[in-house]
Amino acid sequence: MIVDAAVRCFYQHGYDGSSVRDIAQEAGVTPAALYHYYSSKQNLLVDIIARFMASSIDKTEAALRRAGPDPVARLFAAAQAHVLWNASDVASSFIVNSEIRSLEPAHREQNIAQRDRLQRLFDACVEEGCAEGVFTAPWPLEASRAVVVMCTFVARWYRESGPLSPEEIAWRYGHMALSLVGATRGPRFEPPTYESESVNAP
Amino acid sequence: MIVDAAVRCFYQHGYDGSSVRDIAQEAGVTPAALYHYYSSKQNLLVDIIARFMASSIDKTEAALRRAGPDPVARLFAAAQAHVLWNASDVASSFIVNSEIRSLEPAHREQNIAQRDRLQRLFDACVEEGCAEGVFTAPWPLEASRAVVVMCTFVARWYRESGPLSPEEIAWRYGHMALSLVGATRGPRFEPPTYESESVNAP
């Protein structure tokens, strides 16, 4: 598929380092055939970035819906979803997070709007948690941004050959996100721990 | 200076998107003059990345030396230093963190060694803190990696025109790093709080 070939080229050589001819060759089509589907290299980049961002938003919103009203469960779910999505396509994640520079001004504005929308989903979680007193972060929006950044950039080091599955990494990052915002408890769905006299007391 | 021109070119267009001719033009010299100082474009990239990484390590080590033996103070200082260094040169930070792909194999190995060395400085802090019981992170090395990532990628959004100074951002990230590793207290140099009977008891 042409878009997959473009992802491979941009991932390896960058946008300015990849010509339409390179992408067509990688896709096994002629440049003319490529132009039949995409009027320009810019449109290919816009397609890759806008779709990836739209899915980032969709997946985060779906996770939030499933999580219900508890801010702890919401942030935990959103962070997990964001890790899973970025780890699922490290090449596109890389392009989305390194080729904003190559978007023409109108497309860059659309991209900023999508990024803001994604960030606000996390911001709302963190602010709700702070308002309810279950998060204690002194700078909620800084913490929220750091959560998105650390989850996004899992794609920079995650490889399928690594020791942990994406699900295990996402689980850990869900907990680390809660730690980062100073959560006073874990998600409610975790099994409760019972104090017992047989457990060694402090 | 030629290296500054190369940073501007690689930052804007990527390594494969910048020719020696582009860099020479940006530097206001002839390609022949450029080749007098750098035998290849690859050597320019190696120089930019290796120097930035060496300074990352130096600045972190210096911060650790100043911080003394307390793991809380050490992680706080290391995170701050890493934010300040990356915010001080967002263009080089971007290149260092997006053009590993463009390093030839031998240079890539050197780069991985430098990255590992930097990461281990943070890992040692976090492991010391866990051993002393002042950090409670269930996955110390994951938390340590997340600290480095969130501090490194401050360079992706920090701009001089923003509302916060680099020092203020670094201060917040120092605290967020402690939060991320589940620190049970702040750095010791913070003013102690005294319980008093006049304060409302629980």
Image (cartoon, coloured by chain):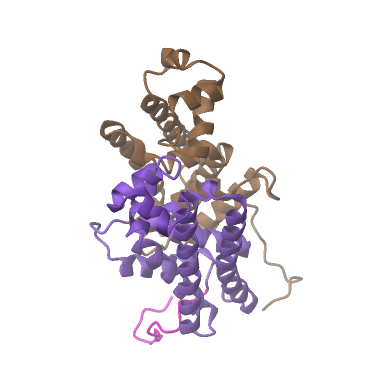
Chain colours: A brown, B purple
Identify which residue, B127 or A196, lies in the foreground: B127
Could you tell me which residue is drawn at 63 percent across and 45 percent down? A159
Q: Can residue A132 be seen in this view?
A: no
Q: Can residue A110 be seen in this view?
A: yes
B44 above or below B179? above
Identify which residue, A192 or B170, lies in the foreground: B170
Rendered image quadrant of residue A100: top left
Could you tell me which residue is drawn at 57 percent across and 71 percent down? B121
In this picture, residue A194 sits left or right of residue B198: right
Q: Where is residue A65 in the image (x, y as percent from the top left)?
A: 47, 36
Quarter of the rendering occupied by the N terminus of chain A: top right
Q: Position of residue B114 (x, y in %)?
A: 57, 64
Could you tell me which residue is drawn at 28 percent across and 36 percent down? A109
Residue B115 sits inside the magenta stretch: no
Could you tell me which residue is drawn at 71 percent across and 50 percent down? A163
B23 above or below B197? above
Q: Main secondary structure of the magenta part?
A: loop
**Total residue callouts:** 0
The boundaries of the magenta stretch are B184-202
Q: Where is residue A127 in the image (x, y as percent from the top left)?
A: 36, 52
B60 above or below A163? below
Q: Residue furthest right?
A: A198
Q: Where is residue B138 in the image (x, y as percent from the top left)?
A: 63, 63
Residue B197 sits inside the magenta stretch: yes
Identify which residue, A92 or A118, lies in the foreground: A92
Quarter of the rendering occupied by the C terminus of chain A: bottom right
Identify which residue, B180 or B200, lies in the foreground: B180
B59 above or below B114? below
Rendered image quadrant of residue A141: bottom left
